[in-house]
Image (tube, rainbow, N blue to C red):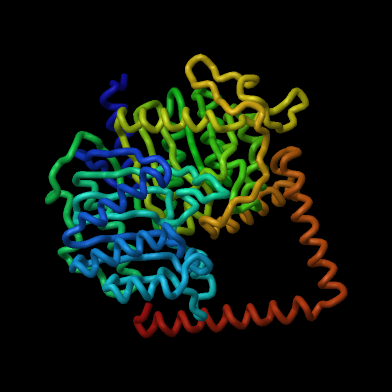
Amino acid sequence: MRTAASRHIAADLALSRAAGAPLIDGNAVRVLRDGAENYPAWLDAIAGAERFIHFDSYILHDDRTGRLFADALAARARAGVRVRVLYDWVGAVRATSRAYWYRLREAGVEVRGFNRPVAWRPLAWLSRDHRKMLAVDGRVAYVSGLCVGDDWVGTADMPPWRDTGVEILGPAVADIHAAFAEIWDTTGAPLPPDEQPACATLPRRGSVALRVIGSTPATAAMLRLDVLVAGLARERLWITDAYFVGVPGYVQALTAAAADGVDVRLLVPGATDLPLVRSFTRAGYRGLLEGGVRVFEWNGSMVHAKSAVADGLWGRVGSTNLNLQSWMGNWELDVAIEDAGVATDLERMFERDLEQCTEVVLDTRRRIQPVPPQAAGGGPASPAPGAPGRGWRRRRGRRGSSGKAAAGALRLGNTVGAALTARRSLGTAEAPTLVTGGTVLLGIAALAVWWPALLAYPAAGLALWLGLSLLGAAWRARAGRT
């Protein structure tokens, strides 16, 4: 008969193998809510830097908040601190001006853009640097879902976005520097050795154990971990995600946990900066609700957090959204924390968020609809959700993370494929998706009948481009180039 200790060892090994990251003890972790808590901590860390700063952000907006960070980074560079900033090229296309980067470089900051599109790699742009991290001097690090911009502090006409981050002190800071070094090295000359501290050289700062998970394209480390945690949860699993487009395997893991008595809850945006992705999120509600998962929509401007907490013992915070683009296509960075104190903080934060949510349920005719939270009931072991009678919000938010439309396209393909192959039953929430898919296909058919050249010439051009790209890749491979 297996003992509790043997079960713990088995779970620890499974989590380490799934995440591809070891458990690092001896850390202090502080959970930070929204820009109001994250940004001041980041700026304090930058101001206190003495040797080097590593800053990786999908988007740095050229707005009031973005310029505040630019001034802080430039000041430390002028003081002799080595400051390195990495941003994503797609994320910065509309958000950041060339003058913004010029001011940083002029001050001595080394700035690199990740994965600029090139003609001979036509599909490489699909993999993005979606990480959000700051690490300073091997002393302190931050991992979060926040980019840099006014969206996270609010404006006169929009409340701040809801988001979550963590501050880390201790040996795990070395792994966060290492994650930065890994992606920095893909963009040019590698980091010097003296900017890559080792875990063994950093002092213990607390008793928190955690894993630093630096996901890279096609590795699916976070997908494996998320599915595993759903399988290990025994009492509750509470999830917040900004761009949820669940794949069948993950949805099955959630519903299997719910069927086994686990209190599974999913909190997603009501209003969003990407309405197309929201429609695909809602298309998946029926399967979740019928499987026993409780779904809540945020009534604020936008919930952009990517976090989870299980059984009051395990928590995750970072940049990975629960969709295939994040799981398989992007460079992401998350921390998985095994500590009752941190998990309690995350649970309290989730309970507080439920006060500004509307629960989505199936009515007596099994139609999906929002209900006042007190009508749905919270259950004896769980908080009562709040914000009665707010309904589904359809206000469009401002621009934040982009690139999630690819996940929406995958959801469209899944729904259309299910309709054509009859491999599963479809719900009423998926009808708009089928209308969209059918309309697009009819439009393509009409173009093919009346204007065949309109389709033939672009198809020929695309085939020519891809063919030349493959030949070029073959030539570079034979020449020993990358």
Q: Is residue 172 above or below residue 180?
A: above
Q: Is residue 424 above or below residue 435?
A: above
Res. 55 image quadrant = bottom left
Tell which of 233 and 95 is nearer to you: 95
For the point 60% across and 51% down, the residue is 397
Residue, far front? 156
Q: Position of residue 413 (x, y in %)?
A: 66, 54
Residue 63 visible in the snapshot: yes
Q: Position of residue 183 (x, y in %)?
A: 34, 64
Say how many tags the image has: 0
Q: Position of residue 386 (x, y in %)?
A: 56, 26
Q: Is residue 460 left or right of residue 211?
A: right
For the point 75% across and 23% down, the residue is 364
| Quadrant, the C terminus | bottom left
Residue 59 visible in the snapshot: no
Residue, far right? 450
Q: Position of residue 167 (x, y in %)?
A: 29, 44
For the point 43% across and 29% down, the residue is 233
Q: Is residue 334 left or right of residue 140?
A: right
| Quadrant, the N terminus | top left
For the point 49% across and 48% down, the residue is 154
Tell which of 214 and 414 is nearer to you: 214
Res. 314 image quadrant = top left
Residue, far top? 380
